[in-house]
Image (cartoon, grey):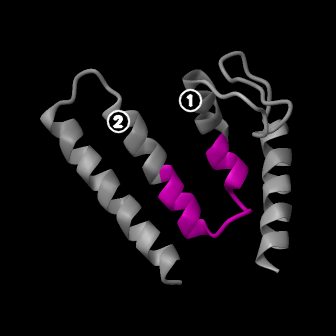
């Protein structure tokens, strides 16, 4: 039962990714997320369309957890991190952990 639901959800996720609007600074994934070879640039580009693509497909807590995770990833990739940025990173990490725990024990 869960396997079929997961397949349906992944297929719907692919449709959402393919349907992402075309913008000059946004990569278009015409085949969804299912292509064979990924680069770091592909992963970064997919991160830009992934959050809107999962909205409505997964529980809201999972969307919030993914949003916090993506924000954390962006923040830690900065070449310089200030004290204020460190505080923000810690806040985002705490948010991610809370949301993750909430969906794990729901």
Q: Nearer the viewer, residue 35 or 52?
A: 35
Find the distance from the CA under tag 2 to the CA under tag 1. Answer: 13 Å
Mark before the other along the chain sequence, 2 or 1: 1
Q: Residue sitting at 65 percent across and 18 percent down?
A: 25
Q: Residue sitting at 50 percent across and 76 percent down?
A: 104
Q: Residue sitting at 32 percent across and 54 percent down?
A: 93
Quarter of image, res 62: bottom right
Q: Is residue 55 above or below residue 26?
A: below
Q: Which residues are magenta?
A: 50-67
Quarter of image, res 5: bottom right
| Disc 1 residue crowd, few under 14, some 14–19, many 20+, Cα 10 Å | some
* In the image: residue 67, left or right of residue 49: left
Q: Nearer the viewer, residue 81 or 32?
A: 32
Identify the residue position indicated by label 1 in the image. 44
Magenta region includes residue 66: yes
Q: Is residue 98 above or below residue 31?
A: below
* In the image: residue 12, left or right of residue 81: right
- Residue 39 image position (x, y, % from top left): 60, 24
- Residue 44 image position (x, y, % from top left): 56, 29
Between label 2 and label 1, give the one nearer the viewer.
1
Magenta region includes residue 8: no
Q: Residue furthest front?
A: 36
What is the chief secondary structure element of the magenta stretch? Answer: helix
- Residue 105 image position (x, y, % from top left): 48, 83
Q: Residue furthest bottom?
A: 106
Which quarter of the figure is the N terminus placed in?
bottom right
Q: Residue furthest left?
A: 83
Q: Residue sitting at 45 percent across and 68 percent down?
A: 100
Badge 2 element: helix
Q: Which mark is residue 92?
A: none
Identify the residue position indicated by label 2 in the image. 75
């Amino acid at each position: 039962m869960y396997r079929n639901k997961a397949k349906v959800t992944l297929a719907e996720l692919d449709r959402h990714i393919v349907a992402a609007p075309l913008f000059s600074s946004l990569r278009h994934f015409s085949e969804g997320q299912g292509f064979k070879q990924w680069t770091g640039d592909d992963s970064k580009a997919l991160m830009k369309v992934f959050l809107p693509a999962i909205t409505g497909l997964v529980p809201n807590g999972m969307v919030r957890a993914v949003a916090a995770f993506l924000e954390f990833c962006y923040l830690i990739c900065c070449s310089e991190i200030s004290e204020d940025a460190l505080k923000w990173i810690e806040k985002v990490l705490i948010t991610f952990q809370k949301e993750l725990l909430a969906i794990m024990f729901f």
